[in-house]
Image (cartoon, rainbow, N blue to C red):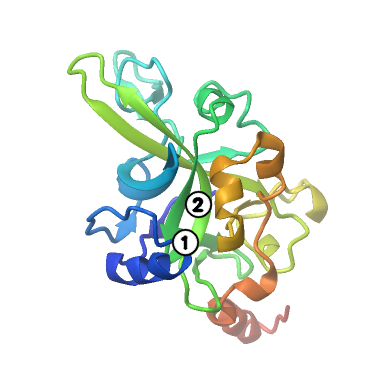
Amino acid sequence: MCNLYNVSPKGEFSTYIAREAPRWMVPDYELGTVGPFQPGVYFRAAGGDVVGEIGQWGLIRPGQPERIDYLPSKVPGKRGRPRSTNNARIETAATRPTFKAAWAAGQRCLVPAAWYQEPNWETGKNIWWQLKRADGLPWMLAGLWSHWTDPATGEIVPSFTMLTTNCDTHPLLNRLHKPDPDLPPDAQDKRSLAHIEAAHWEQWLCGTAAECLELVKPPPVEAFDPAVTARTDDALAALGRQR
């Protein structure tokens, strides 16, 4: 599960889009590191165009009465922490109440990111990995979008989520997240975001559900900047352990 990412700077992203998809409409934005329920930018199909929008990272369930959903609190009379809706499992996106309407309507989006962050626990302590592309280009992460109407004010609030898929057998990504000691390595259900290459953007945004499911998979090892593992590998070597 990803809970922090960095938006690709507008200048760099506009240059990238001008080359790969010159008809896309890139909005003005000044965004940096984004956490759950904070604003980020995403791109969606709109008729025959692709438009960029600023929206909340954390999909708002259709029909919910408040802008942020909350888990029940153990303290009577108090609400709990916000329910996490910034990631959606691809296996259940079509059935979960928060995500199923967006999936059924084909409301798929792409989220540009310079990097995204995941935890590594191989040393026994968390070392954050900021995952970047080896070629220095932005990730274009697969997601879902929605427009929610605030019943109190009538305001239209855009929001989005990132889709995740299993990566238990991925040689790099299976090193991330704290393992469950009671489960075998191939049954941890560790999760990865899905990057969509430029050649498949139209398929992702406008294709059928079946066509899009083919695209939701972890990026290959060679897509990642290999420097991301250096700090962990050095720490493991200092402990007399090797990968």
- Above/below status of 224 relative to 197: below
- x then y, percent, for residue 186: 81, 53
- x then y, percent, for residue 80: 36, 26
- Above/below status of 77 relative to 119: above
Q: Is residue 184 visible?
A: no
Q: Amino acid at mark 2?
A: Cys
* Residue sitting farthest toward the left: 153
Q: Please name the residue shown 34% across and 25% down the image.
A: 148
Q: Which mark is residue 182?
A: none
| Pointer 2 with pointer 1, Cβ within 8 A | yes
- Above/below status of 34 relative to 54: below
Helix, strand or loop at mark 2: loop
- How many numbered tags mark residues here? 2
Question: 208 and 76: which one is in front?
Answer: 208
Q: Which mark is residue 2?
A: 2
- x then y, percent, for residue 90: 64, 39
Q: Please name the residue shown 73% across and 78% down the image.
A: 243
Q: Are there few (<14), some (14-19), or many (20+) residues within 10 Å of tag 1?
A: many
Question: 11 and 223: which one is in front?
Answer: 11
Helix, strand or loop at mark 1: strand
**Circle 1 residue:** 116
Q: Amino acid at mark 1?
A: Tyr
- x then y, percent, for residue 195: 58, 58
